[in-house]
Image (cartoon, coloured by chain):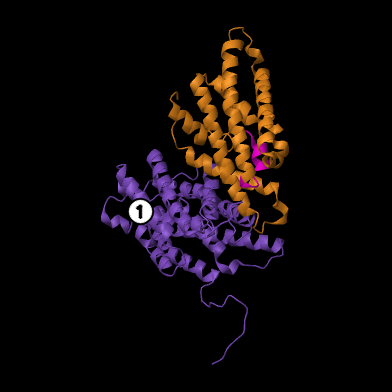
Chain colours: A orange, B purple
């Protein structure tokens, strides 16, 4: 469970944050309508995940633990993530205004994206070292990106289909997510970790 | 000579959706007969209940939505028949009813009906049953082609479809009639066998009736596989790799085919999107 390969398989496939652990579904359903914004969102989430797991590890190990302040873990992690999201927002707004507009409200919402808080909390709970923590953040981001790209391709195709009026739009996205999740859980459930 | 002015398309063939579906059903009939011979007459009730529940679900949905009834085109029959064939012979008779309802209502019609399905309905139905009633869906044995006669008649089959890989040879006729394209079946079969040999797997476990069904009917299903030619080759190779991967970890090459194609269906729009032919002299945006 400690080597990096096992962490990668776990983070990307077996314990995929979106489809197996159901974390971060809000941005998943909100931004996966087209590939461009899905890719932008994934890049932003991955960036924040890596930075957040780095910063969270440093703060937890060198500040909270020595001072016996571990009861502040959740609050300090939330502050770290919020600060990082602000940073990403500045960068995207400056360098890619169209992407900024297409992400819309979902960009500030990364702050409350449970997938990111999930990564840093899991890092602490699984007692990962520095390299493992950062790598777990990275692979979780890869898994997020993969599912976002699959889902956006599916939704672009589903857009042109004649779906019954009663399930059009968001309900239909939940239908797709259900089946995708069934595919993921069943297929990757077999890989021993 | 009599000339007629008509709207396009002008190519006239006898192939219709109904003829394609009924041909596929005809290809599956020999396997049904062999499995009735092997498992006894009870199997017939599983198959019939599965087919009729699929038909009734489809008719009810189309009635409710005021659509034209299309139960004669054979698609619902095909879904029911495949679902029935994927079940073990020991299931209680309400299992195919639930599975066929899930397949036709939630996987076929909620996605827009014939030709719009994202996932193969029969496979999704089986996976749903497998997750919901795991104990009831357990199989008694895993097929093992120990001798050459097992290709004709496999008595260690755990599911109806696994009784005879040879009985599915009619799939070649589908390729001959171009009802399915040769790219997916060929690349899928070749990749699976080559990879299995490379990792030293016993081919007698790999080559089952389930693999034949997957290669000829399930993977090559036109609605759920990519439409581009390169995409189909990638899709076939992808299926082969995943099948061997799952089989390697689980020692169950039958379920491997099911879960592989279910997962590959999810990836198919992504493959399709990235293999569209590029326009010549494209103006960069």
Judged from the image, the secondary structure of the residue bearing numbered disc 1 is: helix
User: Residue B221 versus residue A50: which sits nearer the camera?
Assistant: A50
Q: Position of residue B210 (x, y in %)?
A: 41, 53
Q: Is residue A35 left or right of residue B191?
A: right
Measured along the vertical axis of the image, is residue A83 above or below residue B101?
above
Per the rendered image, the range of residues in magenta is A22-35
Residue at the image point whose x is 70% and y is 49% from the top = A169
Residue at the image point whose x is 68% and y is 21% from the top = A79
User: Residue B218 versus residue B54: which sits nearer the camera?
Assistant: B218
Query: Which residue, as the protein is rendered here, is positioned at the far bottom?
Result: B1
| Pointer 1 chain | B
The quarter holding residue A23 reads top right
Measured along the vertical axis of the image, is residue A50 above or below residue B44?
above
Q: Position of residue A32 (x, y in %)?
A: 64, 44
**What residue would you read off at disc 1?**
B190
Magenta stretch containing residue A31, yes or no? yes
Q: Position of residue A168 (x, y in %)?
A: 70, 52
Q: Residues within 10 Å of mark 1 (few under 14, many from 20)?
A: some
């Amino acid at each position: 469970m400690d080597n990096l390969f096992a962490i990668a398989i776990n983070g990307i496939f077996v314990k995929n944050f979106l489809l197996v652990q159901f974390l971060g579904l809000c941005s998943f359903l909100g931004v996966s309508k087209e590939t461009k914004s899905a890719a932008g969102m994934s890049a932003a989430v991955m960036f924040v995940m890596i930075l957040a797991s780095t910063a969270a590890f440093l703060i937890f190990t060198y500040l909270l633990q020595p001072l016996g302040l571990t009861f502040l873990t959740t609050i300090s992690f939330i502050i770290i993530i919020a600060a990082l999201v602000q940073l990403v927002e500045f960068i995207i707004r400056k360098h890619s205004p169209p992407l900024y507009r297409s992400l819309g409200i979902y960009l500030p919402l990364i702050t409350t994206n449970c997938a990111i808080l999930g990564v840093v909390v899991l890092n602490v709970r699984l007692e990962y070292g520095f390299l493992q923590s950062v790598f777990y953040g990275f692979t979780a981001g890869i898994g997020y990106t993969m599912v976002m790209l699959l889902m956006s391709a599916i939704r672009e195709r589903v857009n042109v289909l004649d779906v019954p009026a009663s399930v059009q739009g968001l309900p239909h996205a939940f239908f797709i997510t259900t089946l995708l999740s069934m595919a993921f859980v069943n297929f990757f459930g077999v890989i021993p970790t | 000579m009599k000339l007629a002015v008509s709207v396009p398309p002008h190519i006239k063939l006898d192939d219709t959706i109904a003829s394609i579906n009924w041909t596929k059903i005809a290809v599956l009939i020999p396997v049904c007969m062999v499995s009735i011979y092997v498992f006894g007459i009870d199997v017939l009730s599983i198959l019939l209940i599965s087919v009729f529940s699929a038909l009734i679900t489809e008719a009810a949905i189309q009635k409710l939505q005021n659509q034209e009834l299309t139960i004669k085109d054979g698609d619902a029959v095909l879904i029911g028949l495949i679902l029935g064939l994927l079940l073990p012979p020991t299931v209680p008779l309400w299992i195919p009813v639930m599975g066929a309802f899930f397949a036709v209502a939630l996987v076929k019609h909620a996605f827009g009906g014939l030709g719009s399905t994202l996932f193969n309905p029969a496979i999704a139905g089986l996976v749903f049953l497998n997750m919901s009633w795991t104990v009831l869906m357990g199989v008694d044995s895993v097929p093992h082609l120990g001798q050459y006669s097992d290709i004709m008649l496999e008595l260690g089959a755990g599911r109806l479809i696994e009784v005879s890989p040879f009985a599915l040879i009619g799939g070649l006729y589908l390729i001959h009639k171009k009802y399915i394209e040769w790219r997916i079946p060929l690349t899928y079969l070749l990749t699976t066998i080559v990879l299995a040999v490379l990792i030293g797997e016993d081919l007698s476990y790999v080559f089952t009736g389930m693999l034949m069904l997957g290669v000829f009917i399930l993977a090559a299903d036109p609605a759920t596989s990519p439409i581009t030619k390169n995409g189909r080759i990638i899709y076939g190779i992808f299926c082969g790799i995943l099948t061997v991967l799952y089989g390697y970890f689980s020692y169950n090459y039958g379920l491997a085919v099911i879960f592989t194609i279910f997962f590959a269906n999810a990836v198919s729009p992504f493959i399709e999107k990235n293999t569209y032919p590029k326009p010549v002299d494209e103006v960069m945006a």
